[in-house]
Image: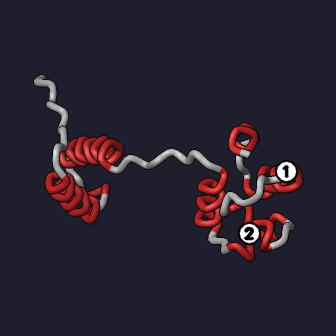
Amino acid sequence: MKQQQKIKILTEEENERYLRTIETLMNKGSDNLTEQENEELTEMSLAVQAFEQNFYEIPKINSLEAMLEFKMYEMRLNRTKLSALLEIGNSKLSDILNGKRPPDIKFLKAAYNKLGIDAGFLLNHA
């Protein structure tokens, strides 16, 4: 049996075309796919995943301020709700987010316990 060649997506247009084909196959339902369609779906999905991991690189969070903004987005919090969750004042949080004030131990403990931010990250970026 001949080895099937892996799909390699090189452009955004190719990626969009494969995404449309994937959607069409998925709309058929997994029970209604032939074995060949199922294999094609798997290959196309892996190719799209590989393309998007390279094309849409997620930047690494490299500051405490960026991590706090990310956690606010992730948890759907505004600054007022975040300061209440961390049990600190709005002005203190604002100063920390704007880099005008270094975080204290109370803040770091709250960020670790209530936001789940890695202790190593907090120590390295405080």
Mark 1 residue element = helix
The residue at the point 15 percent across, 25 percent down is 3
Which amino acid, mark 2?
A: Leu
Q: Nearer the viewer, residue 108 or 27?
A: 108
Q: Which residue is mark 2?
A: 82
Q: Is residue 90 visible?
A: yes
The residue at the point 75 percent across, 40 percent down is 123
Which amino acid, mark 1?
A: Lys
Asked if residue 26 lies left or right of residue 37, the reply is right
State how far apart marks 1 and 2 are (Cα). 14 Å
Asked if residue 66 lies left or right of residue 80, the reply is left
Asked if residue 87 lies left or right of residue 93, the reply is right
Q: Which residue is mark 1?
A: 109
The residue at the point 79 percent across, 53 percent down is 103
Which quadrant of the view contains residue 39?
Answer: top left
The residue at the point 59 percent across, 59 percent down is 70
Image position, residue 44 (x, y; %)? 23, 46
Residue farthest to the front, as pictured: 100
Mark 2 residue element = helix
Q: Nearer the viewer, residue 120 or 33?
A: 120
